[in-house]
Amino acid sequence: MPSTYVQPRYPFRPPSRATEEARLVVVGAGLVGLTAALDLARRGHRVVVLDDDDTVSTGSRAICFAKRTLEIMGRLGLGARFLDKGITWNTGRVFHREREAYSFDLLPEQAHEYPAFVNLQQYHAEQWLVEACEATGRVELRWKHKATGVENRADGARLTVETPDGSYALHAEWLLACDGARSFIREALGLPFTGQVFRDRFLIADVVMNASFPTERWFWFDPPFHPGQSVLLHKQPDGVWRIDFQLGWDADPELEKQPDRVRARVAAMLGPQVPFDLEWVSVYTFRCRRMERFRHGRVFFLGDAAHQVSPFGARGGNGGVQDADNLGWKLAAVLAGEAGEALLDSYDAERIPAADENILNSTRSTDFITPKNEGARAWRDAVLELAHELPMARPFVNSGRLSRPWSGQRLAADAPVLRGNDPDWLLRHIGAGWTLVAREVVPESIAGVTPVLLSDTPRPGALHDHSGLAARRLDLAPGACVLYRPDQAEAARFSAPDIGAIEAARRQVLAA
Ligand SMILES: Cc1cc2nc3c(=O)[nH]c(=O)nc-3n(C[C@H](O)[C@H](O)[C@H](O)COP(=O)(O)OP(=O)(O)OC[C@H]3O[C@@H](n4cnc5c(N)ncnc54)[C@H](O)[C@@H]3O)c2cc1C
């Protein structure tokens, strides 16, 4: 099949010693492991990353990167690359049989640096992360280094690593297991991964074509070109389109992957006159499951290794990037001696409910798309019929509630501001470390906290909130201030910048 992308091949470097020690080791240079490594490196730490392969992800995987992921990538210096290459979209349309049921806008509010979503092949994101990791000079990427043994000890994890040049032992003071849904580390430590398999199959076809569909998410229930099933269409960069065809549980995956059979399905959808090439074809079944706990002493599980969801709602990769965002600053604070190890328990306390929220949403979507019995199907079809005419029926339609940050946390909102006369974005100033955003009052300096002054009028050293949106979105009265953690999550707010209270709030979070 022709490809619009040439996979990079990264060099293998043989191990230098038979036994080694490292402070931070990440197993898995996928989307999540690379994000975690980059975050830790940008916070000043050296990281060893092991991957059993020598390239980025292959074929049809994540394409929808949500606003929160884009904000995190912005903080890691990659936001512009996602915006430049990715396909921006905010609107989705739902079709039922021959007609459109309704459309929706995921970000009706304007004036944010990042849109609701950009579509981008996962391999581009991983390639940029590799480049950014290398540019820090603190990440040692070891390609073709496969973890084949692990022992979890009180002082870290002892890994056995196999390479084409033989094996070696690596002692990690802290281990981040980012080795995907079939996580070797999870299995080797005998940790359960429980949940649900959906009795359905989906054909995912990435198709290269010159098409005039708008840049929107289109979802069909029971369309004439694929009766009784559902279809999802997304635009990607480089003229590639993602089409997901629901096949049903009885479909034969090998037969369905045959190029002629796939071509016939795509042609039925596009019409006989539209030329296209197949770039990648695969058949998937989906699971929703998670580990009981993500922290096991000095071993942490992130991304698909810790939790897995169906792709409806684009919550897998986006959820994993948010795990990395949550853990990075906490580990960095412990390594810098600013916090005790108890802070690391808050990774479980925050990311387990976040994973449950993603699993709940993803399960509900999959149940709606794949009704379990005739009664559920009849209810679904009735809701879809009503949704044409009745807006109140639309919230019951579930073609994938799209990825959102965990509802248990308030994150800093973005807004346009002026720095001098230059247009800028508020969020760019929050998250290099601890940040105190104050409105109109200049706070005294507080060790370990960067002050950001928001002003309604132009003022030296302040961000000018010329539209008033920053104060409104941060819900900040004149004289008030808000303290943000290094992952842009709100830690505390104050009606006035009381140094003692701000220091105490920060200490309380770090001692969690
Ligand atoms: C069809 C499809 C569509 C999807 N669409 C979306 C979407 O639109 N949006 C979204 O957010 N998510 C989506 N996802 C989910 C997303 O792809 C995953 O959630 C994401 O890849 C998880 O990243 P990860 O880094 O945790 O794991 P992975 O990407 O699986 O990376 C794991 C890495 O670990 C390495 N590894 C494994 N074992 C070892 C070992 N023993 N030693 C060393 N290295 C090892 C692997 O080589 C790999 O590089 C989709 C998934 C599929 C299948």
Image (cartoon, helix red, strand yellow):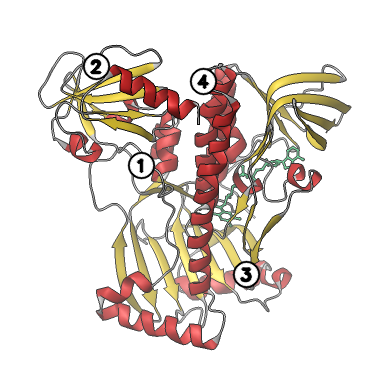
* Residue 33 appears in the figure: yes
Distance from disc 2 to disc 3, alpha carbons, whole Å, reads 54 Å
Distance from disc 3 to disc 4, alpha carbons, whole Å, reads 40 Å
Nearest to the eye among marks 4 and 1: give it: 1
Asked whether, in this view, residue 21 is left or right of residue 211, the answer is: right
First in residue order: circle 2 vs circle 1: 1
Quick one: SS at disc 2?
A: loop
Distance from disc 4 to disc 1, alpha carbons, whole Å, reads 23 Å
Nearer to me, 441 or 382: 441
Q: Dot 4 corresponds to which residue?
A: 43
Q: Dot 2 corresponds to which residue?
A: 443
Vertical comparison of 239 with 376: above or below: above
Asked whether, in this view, residue 459 is left or right of residue 306, the answer is: left
First in residue order: circle 2 vs circle 4: 4
Q: Callout 3 environment at 10 Å: few (<14), some (14 to 19), or many (20+)?
A: some
Q: Dot 1 corresponds to which residue?
A: 410
First in residue order: circle 2 vs circle 3: 3
Nearest to the eye among marks 2 and 4: give it: 2
